């Protein structure tokens, strides 16, 4: 995890008024911060229960750690795409778009140790799943929320008198300190790196982890695409910042030598799907 929601620094957002919840889901801590009208109501409890239920369903369908999941059965060719839940097709179509956008650096089919390709939708599923689950929180009127899964988050400020959520970006070389703090009123923040999970991100064309880069954070309107773009840019290693400039979101690249580079889209940048 390389992004964290930190307490706002203004009087209107007293940290004591923020209600927090956390659950272990999809193999990671999923946390919710709420403030506003419904922060302590039964409606909030019901919305959180819906979020948890939805993410448990995502895990049952897409987790490769579960032998009985639809994704695992597709990977073993025991199930056809037509037999899988419709959301599987949606995730694969997103991955195919990301593969085209990245010239193959991102893919839902990754090289294995024997050189074959294996179905692996995990690069899409976390951001997509959390963004999808956040729909229940948007039904809470006059209530701000920040929903985080393993440090990638969807933030929303519904009240005019509320300040932005303050999102801290961890130093990948020293996770006890922050390299930046980003205010987010509406949108998503996603970070990719190896500080907490080791070298789990690879360039899909080679199967090799990147070098020269510590972490990549992307800020944008969609967590699905912020997560994909952060993963892709990180996988590209030394090419992270240049590729990120072709996208629609803003970003921060922390290089292996500790330098931080803020990245803004170029004027000719395309628009990532869902943005």
Image (cartoon, rainbow, N blue to C red):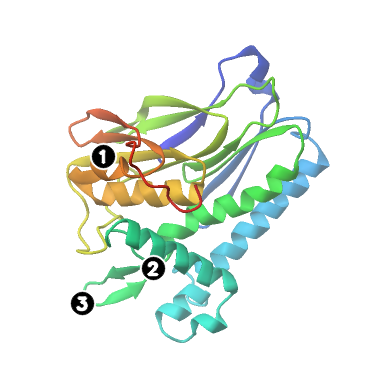
Whole-percent x, y for residue 155 in the image? 57, 37
Q: Position of residue 221 (x, y in %)?
A: 51, 41
Task: Report the residue marked by disc 2.
Answer: 120
Secondary structure at numbered mark 2 = loop
Of circles 2 and 1, the one toward us is 1
Quarter occupied by residue 192: top left
Q: Earlier in the sequence, mark 1 or mark 3?
A: 3
Q: Residue at x 60, y 54 (%)?
A: 132
What residue is shown with label 3?
114
Q: Which is nearer the eye, 269 or 167?
A: 269
Work out whether mark 2 precedes mark 1 in sequence or the reverse, and give the earlier one.
Answer: 2
Q: Residue 241's mark?
A: 1
Q: Residue furthest right?
A: 42
Give left or right: position of 130 versus 217.
right
Q: Regarding mark 1 in the picture, which secondary structure is present there?
A: helix
Q: Earlier in the sequence, mark 3 or mark 2?
A: 3
In the displayed structure, 32 sits above or below 64; it is above
Left or right of 2, for residue 254: left
Residue 24: tell me if it is visible. no
The structure residue drawn at horizontal position 52% and vertical position 57%, both measured from the top left corner, is 26
| Nearer-the-camera pick, 177 or 222 | 222
Where is residue 24? Give x, y as percent: 56, 51
Alpha-carbon span between mark 1 and mark 3: 32 Å
Q: Are marks 3 and 2 in contact (CB under 8 Å)?
A: no
Frontmost of labels 3 and 2 is: 2
Mark 3 vs mark 2, CA separation in Å: 16 Å
Q: Quadrant of the N terminus?
A: top left
Residue nearest the viewer, comparing 173 with 137? 137
């Amino acid at each position: 995890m390389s992004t964290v929601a930190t307490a706002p620094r203004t009087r209107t957002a007293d940290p004591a008024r923020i209600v927090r919840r956390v659950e272990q889901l999809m193999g990671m801590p999923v946390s919710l911060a709420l403030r506003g009208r419904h922060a302590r109501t039964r409606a909030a409890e019901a919305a959180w229960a819906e979020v948890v239920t939805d993410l448990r369903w995502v895990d049952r369908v897409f987790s490769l750690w579960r032998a009985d999941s639809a994704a695992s059965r597709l990977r073993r060719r025991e199930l056809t795409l037509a037999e899988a839940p419709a959301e599987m097709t949606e995730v694969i179509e997103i991955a195919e778009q990301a593969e085209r956008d990245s010239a193959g650096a991102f893919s839902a089919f990754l090289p294995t140790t024997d050189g074959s390709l294996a179905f692996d939708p995990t690069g899409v599923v976390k951001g997509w799943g959390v963004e999808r689950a956040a729909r229940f929180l948007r039904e809470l009127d006059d209530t701000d929320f920040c929903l985080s899964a393993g440090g990638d988050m969807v933030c929303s400020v519904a009240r005019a008198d509320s300040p932005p959520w303050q999102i801290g970006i961890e130093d990948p070389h020293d996770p006890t300190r922050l390299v930046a703090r980003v205010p987010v009123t509406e949108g998503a923040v996603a970070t990719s790196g190896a500080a907490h999970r080791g070298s789990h991100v690879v360039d899909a064309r080679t199967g090799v982890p990147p070098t020269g880069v510590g972490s990549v954070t992307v800020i944008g309107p969609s967590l699905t695409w912020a997560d994909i773009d952060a993963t892709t840019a990180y996988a590209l290693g030394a090419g992270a910042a240049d590729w990120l400039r072709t996208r629609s979101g803003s970003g921060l690249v922390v290089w292996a030598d500790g330098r931080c580079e803020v990245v803004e889209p170029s004027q000719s940048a395309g628009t990532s799907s869902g943005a």
